[in-house]
Amino acid sequence: MVHAYILIQTEVGKAATVAAEIATIPGVTSSEDVTGPYDVIVRAAADNVDQLGQLVVAKVQNVEGITRTLTCPVVHL
């Protein structure tokens, strides 16, 4: 299992709507609107890196109101 945090920037005033819509996507374990340089922080899980990439590109990035994403896979050192 691969876990990642997805940091999202949205259009002005869209953070709450984006966070709520992303929360319904299978594979997303949490989605919260926050303050700071990013507007929404998402935690996601997938069976492997390829499926994680498909989740981000095919589902998360298609949510209306998103301007930029940064995916940060969790590593265990």
Image: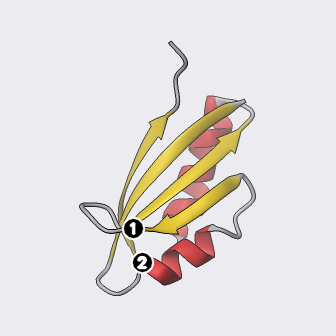
User: From the viewer's perspective, is residue 42 above or below residue 66?
Assistant: above
Q: Could you tell me which secondary element the residue under label 1 belongs to?
A: loop
Specify whether 56 is left or right of 65: right
Crowd band around label 1 with a 10 angstrom C-alpha radius: few (<14), some (14–19), many (20+): some
User: Can the viewer see residue 23 in this picture?
Assistant: yes
User: From the viewer's perspective, is residue 50 above or below residue 17?
Assistant: above
Q: Residue beneath label 2, please?
A: 15
Residue kind at label 1, given as amino acid type: Val
What is the quadrant of residue 46 in the picture?
Answer: top right
Which image quadrant: the N terminus? top right
Counting from the top left corner in percent of width and height, residue 19 is at 53, 72
Q: Residue beneath label 1, please?
A: 34
Q: Which residue is located at x 53 percent, y 68 percent?
A: 62
Residue kind at label 2, given as amino acid type: Ala
User: From the viewer's perspective, is residue 23 above or below residue 27?
Assistant: below
Specify whether 53 is left or right of 1: left
Q: Which residue is located at x 49 percent, y 62 percent?
A: 61
User: From the viewer's perspective, is residue 72 above or below residue 11?
Assistant: above
Outermost residue toward the left in this view: 37
State the residue in front, 66 or 36.
Answer: 36
Counting from the top left corner in percent of width and height, residue 53 is at 57, 42
Contact? badges 1 and 2 (CB < 8 Å): yes
